[in-house]
Amino acid sequence: MGRATIRTTLIEGTVTNVPAPHERPRYRRVADELRHRIMSGAIPAGSILPSETTIMAEFGVARGTAREAIALLRSEGLAITEMGRGTFARPVLPIRRLGSERYRRELEQIRGDLPPETSFTVDQGVRWNDYRLDKAFHEVPAGVATADLFGVPAGTMLLERRFVFYTDGVAQQMSTSYYLLAMVAGTPVADPDREPWPGGNTAQMYSLGVTITGIRERVRSRMPVANEVETLHIPGGTPVVTIARQTYAEDQVVEVADIVIPADRVELGYWIDLT
């Protein structure tokens, strides 16, 4: 490596040596090399990264520079630091494919004697017994935004259902969904002990004599909020994909949901029939 180009600058009577404009800061150069090793597989996913002491010796930098380099990799979602263990290249997590056909599998649940599943188990490719839910049900008045999605007055009573979905003990998805309380109060649909329900929302509505005829989803991305980071163990720099869902029975909206999934664990794929 050639000698660094130094520019001498006079600031308030003090001579200061600063890097030339074209020179990248040392911590970024260290991060560039470590990033290359992670992306190329030289440091496999899940493997420990060099310690600060090792980085200092290899690159000839101070400890603060080594820490800045690691912090940059964490902010990019490439590294995870575990207290007392070290910093690791982030493990590669299974990618879920979300497509419109996943809801047809829920519809099939009410049409035949099939193994239990929902759109989530279809997305994840897991068996019924390989996933679980954290759940909390509450009766709440509809806020303005949610009431608008239902097409009802604000303050209309709703059944709010908060879920965290797990596979193999890892939280994969959060959702908050709502039913009109007048439609589900006193029925098994309002009983959290019945969850998870084979066939999901489609089968739940069918049990009440309501046939689902359509689902509208709006997908966007944003940075996660604090409770999402904590619950889903989202590394720094990783956005989430949010899905705002309205479930229809003819012209009536019978369910509204907001689904949150870490963006590095999901792929959106839709078949569009133009025939």
Image: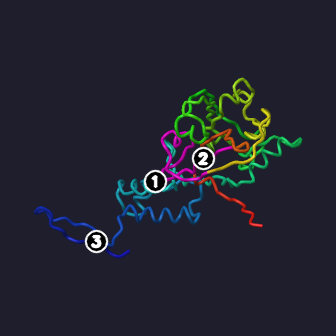
User: Which amino acid type is shown beneath numbered disc 2?
Assistant: Ala
Report if residue 121 lies within the magenta region.
no
Q: Callout 2: 10 Å neighbours few (<14), some, many (20+)?
A: some
Q: What's the CA distance linking mark 3 and mark 1?
A: 26 Å
Report if residue 243 lies within the magenta region.
yes
User: Which amino acid type is shown beneath numbered disc 3?
Assistant: Ala
Q: Position of residue 186 (x, y in %)?
A: 72, 23
Residue labelled with disc 1: 75
Q: Which residues are magenta?
A: 218-247
Q: Is residue 268 above or below residue 20?
A: above
**Residue pictured at 15% horizontal, 63% vertical:** 11
As drawn, is 16 to the left or to the right of 206?
A: left
Q: Work out whether residue 24 or residue 135 is closer to the camera in this orientation and state it.
A: 135
Q: Quadrant of residue 264 in the image?
A: bottom right
Q: Position of residue 88 (x, y in %)?
A: 53, 52
Residue labelled with disc 3: 20
